Image (spheres, grey):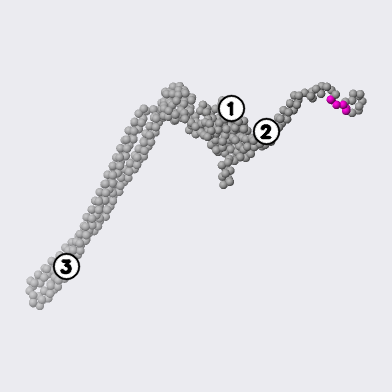
Amino acid sequence: MLNISNNNPIGEGIDKYSTFSTLANRPHYKILNRIILAVSVLCIIILFLPWTQNISGTGAVTTLKPDQRPQTIHAAIAGRIEKWYVKEGDFVKKGDTILFISETKEDYLDPNLVENTQSQLKAKEMAGKSYGGKVSSLSAQIAAIQSERELKLKQAKNKIRQSLLKVKSDSMDLIAVRTQIKIANTQFNRSLSLNKEGLKPMTDVEEKRLKLQEVEAKIITQENKLLTSENEYINAKVEVNRIVAEYSEKEQKTKSDQFTALSSQYDTEAQVNKLKNQYANYQIRNGMYYIKAPQSGYINRALQSGIGETIKEGTQIVSIMPSKYDIAVETFVSPTDLPLLHKGEKVRVWFDGWPTIVFSGWPGMSYGTYGGKIVAIENFISENGKFRVLIAPDKSEVPWPKQISIGSGAQTLALLENVPVWFEVWRTLNGFPPNYYKPKSNLQKDKK
C-alpha cells in the first residue's frame, strides 16, 4: 500500500468494532459449529457403512408358463358368424362353446357331405372286397390248372412209356419174323436140294415155298407195325410238349387276370384311404364350426362382432385370460449388467399401485418389496436394447399379492456385493460398473 490516505486500515484489527464483538459472542454460533462438526463426523461415519450394490430394472407382471398368459382364439376355417354364446367378462370352462360359424366355401356347402362321403367309402370298401374275392378265386383257378397239368403230364408220360414198350415189343417181333424168314429160306433150299436128288417130293418143296412167302409177307406187316409204334411214341412226346404249352398259356392268362384284379384292388384301396382321409377331414371340419375355449378363463375382449360377418382362416375372434396361472415378473436390464445376473439369484420386487419405501443400498430397511428369484435370462437382446429376465416369487418369503393384475408395472433390484458407501460413491462418480459378481453356489463349485 502507498499509505497516501490518513485512514490506514493496516495494522488495525476488527476487534475495536463492537458489532463484531457482539456477533462473535452470540451462543447459537457455537451450536451451529457443533452441528456442522457433528454432521461432518456423521458423514464420515456413513462413508464407511456397508452399501449393497444392485442392478435395477423395470418391467411388467406376467405369468411363469407360456400357456398361462393371455391368448387370442383364432378361427381355424373360414366362415360366417351365426351365433355368439358368450359376452365380454364371462367365465368359460375348457371346451365351452364361444361362437358358432357356418360354411362359406362351395366345396363344403352340402349338408349331407359327411354321410355321402361315408356311403362312397362303404361302396369302395365293398368293391375292394370284391376284387379281393376275385383274386382269391383266380388263385384257386391257377392251383387247379397246375394240378390238372401235373395229371395230364403224368398221363402223357405213361403213354410215352407204353409207346416205348410197344416199340420194343414190335422190334422184338420183327427180329423174330426175320429169324423165321431165315429158317423158312433154309428149309426151302434144303427141300429143293432133296427134291433134285429125288429124296423129297415136289409137294414138300411147294409147301416150303408157300411158307417162305407167308413169312416174307409177315415181315412187311411187322415192319409197318413197328413204324406205327414208333410214330405213337413220337406222338406221345409231342403230346407232352403240347400239354405243357397249353396249360402254361392257361396259367399265364389266369395270372394276367389275377394281376389285373390285384391292380384294381390296390387302386381301390388307395381310393378307400383317400375317402377315409376326406371323411375324417369333413368330420373334423364339422367340429370346427363351433369355436370352443382351449382352457378355462375369462373372456377379455371380443375382437369380432355382429351376426353374418364373414371371417377368414386364422382370424382372431376373442382374447381369453386363463383363470389359473403362476405369476411372475419380466424385467429388462442393460447389456453391461447382464454378466452380473445368474439363475437362482434373489431379487427384490415392488409393484405399481402398492405403497413402497425403497432404499436401494439398504434393502433391509425397505418397505413394500417382495422377494423373487431369477428363473430365466434371455440370451438375445430385445427390441428396447436390453435383455429380458424372468423372475418368479421366492417361496421362502412373503407371498406376492393376489390382487396384482397381469400386465401391471413392476420394478426390480438384483442384490450384489456389499461395499462401503465411499466406494459406491467413487464408483458412481467415475461411471464404473458394479463389481463382477458370482453367486456363492458357483464359488463353492469353483473351489471344489
Give residue 362's position: percent from left, percent from top: 62, 32
Residue type at numbered disc 2: Ile
Q: Secondary structure at mark 2?
A: helix
Residue 174 forms part of the magenta stretch: no
Stretch of the chain drawn in magenta = 10-15
Q: Secondary structure at mark 1?
A: loop
Most foreground residue, 53 or 273: 53
Image quadrant where residue 350 sits: top right
Residue 176, disc: 3
Closer to us: mark 2 or mark 1? 2
Give residue 382's position: percent from left, percent from top: 57, 34
The residue where tag 2 is placed is: 46
Compared across the picture, whether 271 is left or right of 170 comes to right
Whole-angstrom CA distance, mark 3 to mark 2, is 152 Å
At 7% from the left edge and 74% from the top edge, which residue is drawn?
201
Residue type at numbered disc 3: Ala
At 56% from the left edge and 25% from the top edge, which residue is drawn?
353
10 Å neighbourhood of mark 3: few (<14), some, or many (≥20)?
some
Residue 356, disc: 1
